[in-house]
Image (spheres, helix red, strand yellow):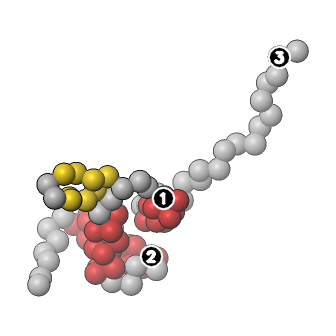
């Protein structure tokens, strides 16, 4: 099977992810994308939605193109009423 990538920005994103070591091949990228999209399954014609897990969150965060953004909350003291 041959898959053609027609969008240059998609190709650049794939190559950048592989360069950073997130994935070793395009097949790994496709496999992770298919696993992530399998949270919605078809079961005898009915839609079954699987609950997301912490592992799903970690995988999604690691696959983010915006990994340099810090998600740590600021550690400033909150104002308190007297």
Residue 15 appears in view: yes
Q: Earlier in the sequence, mark 1 or mark 2?
A: 2
Q: Earlier in the sequence, mark 2 or mark 3?
A: 2
Q: Left or right: where does residue 19 sit relative to residue 70? A: left
* Crowd tier of the residue under label 1, counting other residues whose Cα lies within 10 Å: few below 14, some 14–19, many 20 or above: few
Quadrant location of the C terminus in the rendered image? top right
**x%, y% of residue 45?**
14, 54
Relative to the observer, which residue lies in front, 49 or 79?
Answer: 49
Q: Earlier in the sequence, mark 1 or mark 3?
A: 1
Kindly check if marks 2 and 3 are in contact, taking CB atoms under 8 A apart as contact. no
In the depicted structure, whether residue 62 falls above or below residue 71: below
- What is the secondary structure assignment of the residue under circle 1? loop
**x%, y% of residue 74?**
70, 42
Labels 2, 3: front one: 3
Residue under numbered circle 2: 22
**Image quadrant of residue 7?**
bottom left
Residue under numbered circle 1: 53
**x%, y% of residue 60?**
44, 61
């Amino acid at each position: 099977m041959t898959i053609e990538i027609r969008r240059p920005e998609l190709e650049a994103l794939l190559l950048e992810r592989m360069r950073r070591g997130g994935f070793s091949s395009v097949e790994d990228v496709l496999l992770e994308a298919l696993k992530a999209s399998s949270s919605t399954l078809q079961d005898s014609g009915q839609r079954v939605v699987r609950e997301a897990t912490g592992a799903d969150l970690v995988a999604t965060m690691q696959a983010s193109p915006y990994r340099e953004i810090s998600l740590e909350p600021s550690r400033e003291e909150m104002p308190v009423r007297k």
